[in-house]
Image (cartoon, coloured by chain):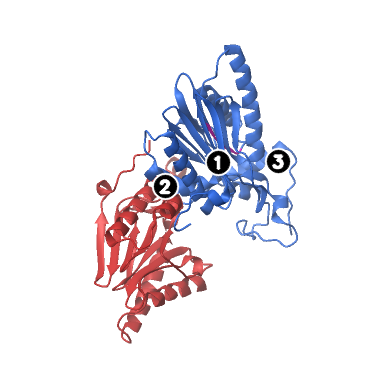
Chain colours: A red, B blue
Amino acid sequence: MSEELFPEPEWLSEEVKTGTTIIAVTFDGGVVLGSDSRVSAGESVVNRVMNKLSPLHDKIYCALSGSAADAQTIAEIVNYQLDCIKHEEDDPLVCSAATLVKNISYKYKEELSAHLIVAGWDRKKGGQVYATLNGLLSRQPFAIGGSGSFYINGFVDAEYRKNMTKRESQEFVVNALTLAMGRDGSSGGVAYVVTIDKDGAEEKCVLGNELPKFFDE
Amino acid sequence: MHFTVVFSGLSGVCDRLRQARVRTPAAGSFSNVVSVKMATVLQFPASVSTFNNYNDLYPDWTQREVSTGTTIMAVEFEGGVVIGADSRTTTGAYIANRVTDKLTPIHERIFCCRSGSAADTQAIADAVTYQLGFHSIELDEAPLVQTAASLFREMCYRYREELMAGIIVAGWDPRRGGQVYTVPVGGMMTRQPVSVGGSGSSYIYGYVDSNYRAGMSKEECLKFTAEALTLAMERDGSSGGVVRLAVISEQGVERQVILGNQLPKFSTV
């Protein structure tokens, strides 16, 4: 009787997902990664300030999306694996980090549901972005992921240009995140932006009221 | 065990549509008209994933309903409206018609853009054309765009369980000028300066939000619509073909077609 009067909230039994928007873009000399900050369990937002840009190494970051637990675990494992090989050579290649992520995603693809975008800078090839959806590995000039990314496909296709400057890439990432957060119910909060170039990684957080405004009707 | 779907009239479709409504995914995941439709009409054993269905014995389009999985768009400007649509009609993975005209005239200066089930939208459009024609003769003047939109809404809401239709009604009338009304699946109606619809529309929300400005001219609206539709057609498998555009204003209706090789080009696309 009491169970019917006060039913258990749905979100207690829902899996925690980072229904999200993530994006990574290369520019001349590095990469810019961006993500929103909302983690939802069903219809409830369980964390509104989560940083989904996880460091794998000094100059290699990955952006998490999909199931929060799966994505975090993959990132931690790869972080550990890269630390192990750090003793052998100074800077691991972004390609190596992406391959490690891909190996885990592919091997356990039936059990896991996480999509990580790996991006960073290394001496050999400069700024690179790799998408590792479901176990594939694909190097791209830019990559978007997460539930909110569907809404900005048209925008990024239209607005991306090769060889943007660092400033332009950061604006591009923040604009794309803002538009996606405006349309996707599972993305929102603040925007985290990480810029990686030969000097290192710089993290920035753009608060809600500082995001650009797009007036649609 | 292998099931084949047999459509035995509207009641069969109703049951399945009702089931699909119950199974609609909760907030936090992406769903569109086309995937709900696919889940509806495929009856396979639970162990087979309905999303990546591959069966050697039967081509997949023999078991799918015809749908205008599509991209449609309408924009108001000072003095009229610009409407646009792609031209692909699919039955599953087969393109049943690659030069479809989804911009259907309802009255002299009122058009509707159709998305969803091809059969449902054609039937609704025919019914509304009849009702509006009758109404206009009774009034002895041009009907209002809002009237046409209300008729669509009335039908889409009343038969919401049986229908799968997302419609954008746009036109020009002497009282309020150019207007765009959107009547999505479910039967809501609302007026908007710019509206996109269909399965491909999800991909261009970001583009439309960032590039729409109030007070654009007719040429700017045409360019905006053509570019948005092109972007959606590149990303959505159920949209493609040519871009059909129409401008409705006091002077009448001007139609144009942009062929595949004349579509605007983007550096990534």
Judge from the rendering whether residue B216 lies leftward or rightward of residue B83; answer left or right: left
Nearer to the camera, B191 or A45: B191
Residue B160 is situated, as x and y percent measured from the top left of the image, at 59, 34
Judge whether residue B166 is colored magenta. yes
Disc 1 marks a residue whose amino acid type is Ala
Q: In which quadrant of the rendered image does the C terminus of chain A lie?
A: top left
Q: What is the secondary structure assignment of the residue under circle 3?
A: helix
Q: Name the residue under label 3.
A: B12
Kindly report which numbered mark, 3 or 1, lies closer to the viewer in this rendering: 1
Tell me which label, 3 or 1, sits earlier in the chain. 3
Tell me which label, 2 or 3, sits earlier in the chain. 3
Kindly report which numbered mark, 2 or 3, lies closer to the viewer in this rendering: 2
Furthest residue in direction bottom, as rendered: A88
Q: Can residue A1 be seen in this view?
A: no
Q: What is the secondary structure assignment of the residue under circle 1?
A: strand
Task: Give residue B85's mark.
Answer: 1
Mark 1, chain letter?
B
Judge from the rendering whether residue A158 lies leftward or rightward of residue B123; answer left or right: left
Residue A69's place in the image compared with B106, above or below, is below
Disc 3 marks a residue whose amino acid type is Gly
Nearer to the camera, A44 or A64: A64
Q: Name the residue under label 2.
A: B207
Mark 3, chain letter?
B
Instruction: Give the alpha-carbon distance from disc 2 to disc 3, as whole Å.
Output: 39 Å
Q: What stretch is highlighted in magenta?
A: B164-169
Residue B131 is situated, as x and y percent measured from the top left of the image, at 63, 21
Counting other residues with Cα less than 10 Å from the Cα at mark 2, is it few (<14), some (14-19), or many (20 or more)?
Answer: many
Residue A2 is situated, as x and y percent measured from the top left of the image, at 44, 43
Evaluate whether label 1 is on the same chain as label 2: yes
Q: Residue at x 56, y 52 (%)?
A: B261
Disc 2 marks a residue whose amino acid type is Tyr
